[in-house]
Image: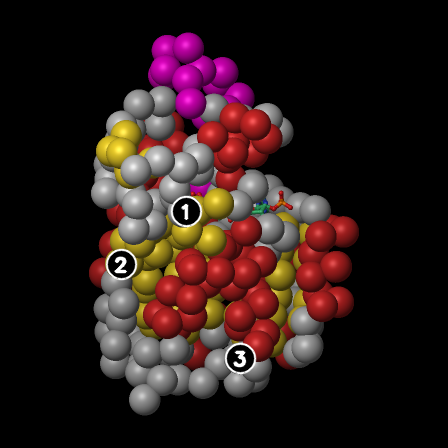
Amino acid sequence: MALSLKNKLVLITGASSGIGEATAKLCDQLGARLILIARREDKLKALANSLQNECLPIKLDVRNREEVENTVKSLAKEWQSIDVLINNAGLSKGLNRLHEAPIDDWEAMIDTNIKGLLYLSKAIIPGMVERQKGHIVNLGSIAGHQTYPGGNVYCATKAAVKSISEAMKIDLLGTNIRVTSIDPGMVETEFSQIRFDGDKERASKVYEGLKPLTGEDIADAIVYSITRPEHVNIQDMIIFPTAQASATLSFRNNKKAH
Ligand SMILES: NC(=O)c1ccc[n+]([C@@H]2O[C@H](COP(=O)([O-])OP(=O)(O)OC[C@H]3O[C@@H](n4cnc5c(N)ncnc54)[C@H](OP(=O)(O)O)[C@@H]3O)[C@@H](O)[C@H]2O)c1
């Protein structure tokens, strides 16, 4: 039987947009209490106001190790026992060839997608181990399984997330804590706009001529994973739009396109 999310405490990073926002809404509908993390406080507050259950929006940059540690340490007692950690905050910057890319883009991706995920995990998993319960969901990507042209460092960060998820499962074996990696293909969110520095026209071309996944599709997969019975661990879920076969092959405007 599916587990209930009623009164479960779920922390979502990157909750101000896309997959994180959709996951927050779905978890709220199912009765969860939420800690919502992102840098854009206005977006978090607007989301928090639209939810039915108790929720705690926190403005936090996951790249800031000290801020992450202090935020988790200073949570009020009723917000400390986190049942589900959803490490979703992440981004891609550019599609340049490795030798031509700005190093700042690499730093942003490595600091957010790898180090931010590790900082949150290090701050929260010890409490889960103490309580002998919890679930960690990491947002990987098909980019962690297949390297595509211009993907270089973004793909490397998601390959790191794949390894970190596998390592967490190994290191937490013997506890009741579950670890899931959710690895989508194309999802239409703010992701491509961020990748192309706000160029909406270039971003919309990514999804042209096909029906991409939505944040809600991925939220559905996350909620499926966290509501399985306690002895069931969904280890890794690769999710493509029907019109995408690999990181580089899709079906657009009724023809195959690389
Ligand atoms: N869209 C896709 O095609 C796709 C495919 C595979 C995997 N993914 C992964 O899915 C995750 C969510 O992406 P999305 O598609 O939902 O993109 P999105 O709409 O751009 O959302 C990204 C979220 O991450 C937050 N974020 C970024 N940097 C942050 C930081 N330093 N500290 C705190 N929060 C930060 C953003 O909030 P603020 O800007 O307010 O901080 C935003 O809420 C990412 O890990 C991404 O790599 C996406």
Mark 1 packing: few (<14 Cα in 10 Å), some, or many (20+)?
many
Ligand 1 neighbours mark 1 (CB distance < 8 Å): yes
Look at 25% across and 77% down and name the residue there.
Answer: 232
Q: Position of residue 241 (x, y in %)?
A: 33, 50
Up/down of 40 relative to 197, above or below: below
User: According to the image, label 2 marks what residue?
Assistant: 236
Look at 41% across and 17% down and name the residue there.
Answer: 96
Is 88 displayed left or right of 141 in the figure? Answer: right
Quick one: which residue is furthest to the top in this view? 100
Label 2: element kind:
strand
Up/down of 213 relative to 150, above or below: below
User: Tag 3: residue type?
Assistant: Leu
Q: Position of residue 47 (x, y in %)?
A: 69, 61
Q: Does the image show residue 110?
A: no
Q: Which residues are magenta?
A: 95-113
User: According to the image, label 3 marks what residue?
Assistant: 30
- Whole-number angstrom distance, CA of label 2 to CA of label 1: 20 Å
Look at 52% across and 31% down and name the residue there.
Answer: 203
